[in-house]
Amino acid sequence: MTSRVGLRFLQNSRAAFQRFTSPFRTPGGRNLRYQSTEAGSSSSTAQPQSFLQRSWNSPIGLKTVHFWAPVMKWILVLAGLSDMAKPADKLSLTQNGALMATGAIWTRWCLIITPRNVLLATVNFFVGLLGATQVTRIFLHRRSVDGSAKEALKDMTHEATGGAKAIVHKAEEVVKKN
């Protein structure tokens, strides 16, 4: 019994290793990615696929999260564009700083992962660009109000770290009570 299980494990692991090292080719040389489901059809007589069929069957196609996540994320870009009409004193520095940072980080990540998702990288690039634009607007507004760039940066740093300091202060109070 144990020798059969061990043999099956060895056979399955070898097959898995072959799939891992050559994911789109079988030893016979047939392409697995767009294989036809019809019995007995050869690759030379297969009909070329239309754009819609290729999009549907693609590893980043219409039926996957790799397509729908970027489509939904464009809402953030539209919200950022609508914030361009707001005055700079009404904008949140922490929110726009977070949008700028996540846009930059996820743009790079989308180009590293497999399958490479250029649509998601594009939307993240625009999220980061809008965040950087809004942070620049906030900085320029604060500089015009305070009169110097140093004071504006000091105020922005205080605002960005003020929330964290308040959380730490509350946590210290809770610890002192217990």
Image (cartoon, rainbow, N blue to C red):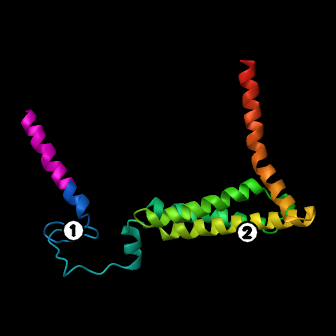
Query: What main secondary structure does the magenta stretch of the protein show?
Result: helix
Query: Does residue 72 belong to the magenta stretch?
Result: no
Q: Residues within 10 Å of mark 2 (few under 14, many from 20)?
A: some
Instruction: Pick the residue in front: 86 or 97.
Output: 97
| Magenta region, residue range | 1-16
Q: Residue 110: x and y, percent?
A: 49, 64
Using the rendered image of the protein, determine whether residue 87 is visible from the camera's viewpoint.
no
Using the rendered image of the protein, determine whether residue 8 is visible from the camera's viewpoint.
yes
In three-dimensional space, the C-alpha distance between marks 2 and 1, rounded to whole angstroms, equals: 47 Å
Q: Residue 137: x and y, percent?
A: 80, 67
Residue 62 - label: none
* Residue at x 38% of width, y 69% of height: 58
What amino acid is found at the position of numbered circle 1 in the picture?
Arg
Q: Which residue is mark 1?
A: 25
Is 69 on the left or on the right of 116, as rendered? Answer: right
* Residue at x 41% of width, y 72% of height: 55
What amino acid is found at the position of numbered circle 2 in the picture?
Thr
Spot the residue most to the top. 178
Is 175 on the left or on the right of 39, as rendered? Answer: right
* Residue at x 16% of width, y 76% of height: 42
Q: Quadrant of the C terminus?
A: top right
Q: Residue 35: x and y, percent?
A: 24, 69
Q: Quadrant of the N terminus?
A: top left
Residue 133 - label: 2
